[in-house]
Amino acid sequence: MTRTARRLVHLVDDDPGVRTALASMLATWDFEVVAHESAEAFLDALAAGASSCVVADVRMPGMGGLELQRELARRGAALPVILITGHGDVPMAVAAIKAGAHDFIEKPVDDDALAAAIRRALALVEETEGARAALEALRLRHARLTAREAQVMGLVVAGHSNASIAAQLGLSQRTVEHYRAQVMMKMEAPSLAALVKLAAALGE
C-alpha cells in the first residue's frame, strides 16, 4: 500500500533501542514513522492539522504518555494516542482510556496487536476528517441560500406547510413553492426528511 498522510505514526519513547526496534517493525507494516525521544520534542515538532496517530510510552522522563494525551486534548489536537505500558501501569492506562486515549498495548509489545491498534486509530482519524469535511461542505451549501430561502428552509424543517409559510411571510403559495424548490436544490436534499437531517447537522 502506498504511504499517505493517513498512515503516519508518531513514535514517542525515551529508549533509543525501543524507538529503533518499533520503528523498524512498523515500517514492515508500511507505516511512515517519525520517532521522537520525548513528549516535549514531539509537541515542539507537531504540525497543525497533521493526519496521524501517536504511540507513546506511559513512563518517560518529564512528560509521560498519559500527560501527553492530556496535553493534546487541551490543545484540541485530534490525534488518537496509543499507550505502551508495563504490567504495573495497566490501571494508569485504563484511566487514560477513560480520559480519551485510544488504546493501550502491554509490554512486551505484540507486533500484530500494535499494528492493528494503529490501523484502528488511523481509520478513526480518516472517519473524523471525512465527517469534518462533509460538515464544511454542508455549511458552504447553506451559505449559498438567500436570506429568504434560509427563512423558508427554517419554517419547512419546523414542520410548517406551504400555506402556513405563505401566510407568515406574506407570500403566495406559488412563491413559497419556488423558494422551497431552490432550497432543496441548493442543499442537495432529495427529500424533506433529508433536508430535516441536514438542518439538524447544521444546528438549525
Image: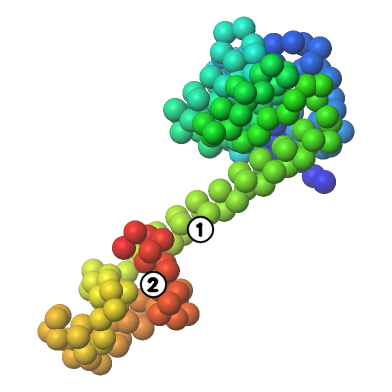
Q: Position of residue 55 (x, y in %)?
A: 68, 27
Query: What's the residue at 60%, 22% (across, down)?
Result: 92
* Mark 1 → mark 2, Cα distance in angstroms: 16 Å
On screen, 30 above or below 190?
A: above
Q: Residues within 10 Å of mark 1 (few under 14, many from 20)?
A: few
Q: Residues within 10 Å of mark 2 (few under 14, many from 20)?
A: some
**Figure quadrant of the C terminus:** bottom left
Q: Amino acid at mark 2?
A: Val
* Residue 22 can be seen, yes or no: no
Q: Is residue 35 left or right of residue 177?
A: right
Residue for badge 1: 134
Q: Position of residue 26 (x, y in %)?
A: 81, 31
Query: What's the residue at 50%, 51% (across, down)?
Result: 132
Q: Which residue is the extreme one toward the right?
A: 28
Out of 6 and 145, give the one closest to the viewer.
6
Q: How many marks?
A: 2
Query: What's the residue at 50%, 58% (across, down)?
Result: 134
